[in-house]
Image: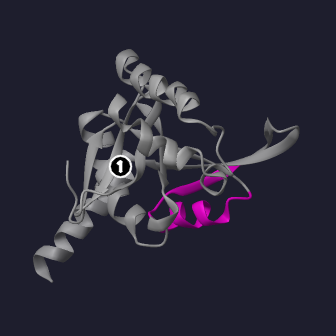
Amino acid sequence: MKTENYTLKEIQDSDIENIYKGLSDPEITQFYDVHFPTLEATKEQMEWYADLKKNGTGIWWGIYNENEEFCGAGGFNSLEKENQKAEIGLWLLKEFWGKGILKEVMPKLFEIGFTTLNLNRIEGFVVSENSKCRAALSKINFTHEGTMREWEIKNGEKIDVAIYSILKSEWLTKKYREELIQKYD
């Protein structure tokens, strides 16, 4: 699957070194529930990706630029077919931060979620202190629904988590509006 400048390739076992490069970096995983200090430990994450696909509870892709460089990963987990919802996630290697990748890749993930996966709701859960991620979700039309106070405990610390969402009806309205603007601009 392609966007203008990026290609999404389903995560495979052979991607382990790329996944390790990202999920072993403390700056990247600062607000995540996972961190893998060794390549061997990263096998757990690779099994998680495979289990999502096998169980029908999600799917993740590697994000590659025009030079075939791995930039990060994004996808869906906690997919509930009966409720037509899933949680979206995305992380980037530090050298690709601030390059507009989120703004370009997220609409493609929305398209996959709302059409191929037949979702009605896409959710994003963000540690409240992660102001960059919260701002990025707002920029791509997620609605902040509220904050779950002391929702999880990480390293003995109680953490508030903000919940964001975008609904299929909102995505369709925005998509339709953008197509009209492009058509008549």
**Horizontal side of residue 176 vs 147, given as left or right:** left
Q: Percent x, y for residue 95?
A: 47, 67
Residue 28 drawn in magenta: no
Image quadrant where residue 23 sits? top right
Instruction: Tell me which segment is drawn in magenta.
Output: 129-147
From this viewpoint, is residue 138 visible?
Answer: yes
**Horizontal side of residue 11 vs 141, given as left or right:** left
- Give the quadrant of the C terminus: bottom left
Secondary structure beneath disc 1? helix
Residue at 45%, 28% in the rendered image? 46
Q: Percent x, y for residue 44?
A: 54, 25
Q: Percent x, y for residue 34?
A: 63, 37
In the rendered image, which residue does mark 1 sit on? 169
- Going by the numbered disc 1, the residue's amino acid type is Ser
Task: Give the answer, above or below, for where 63 lies relative to 56.
Answer: below
Residue at 47%, 32% in the rendered image? 77
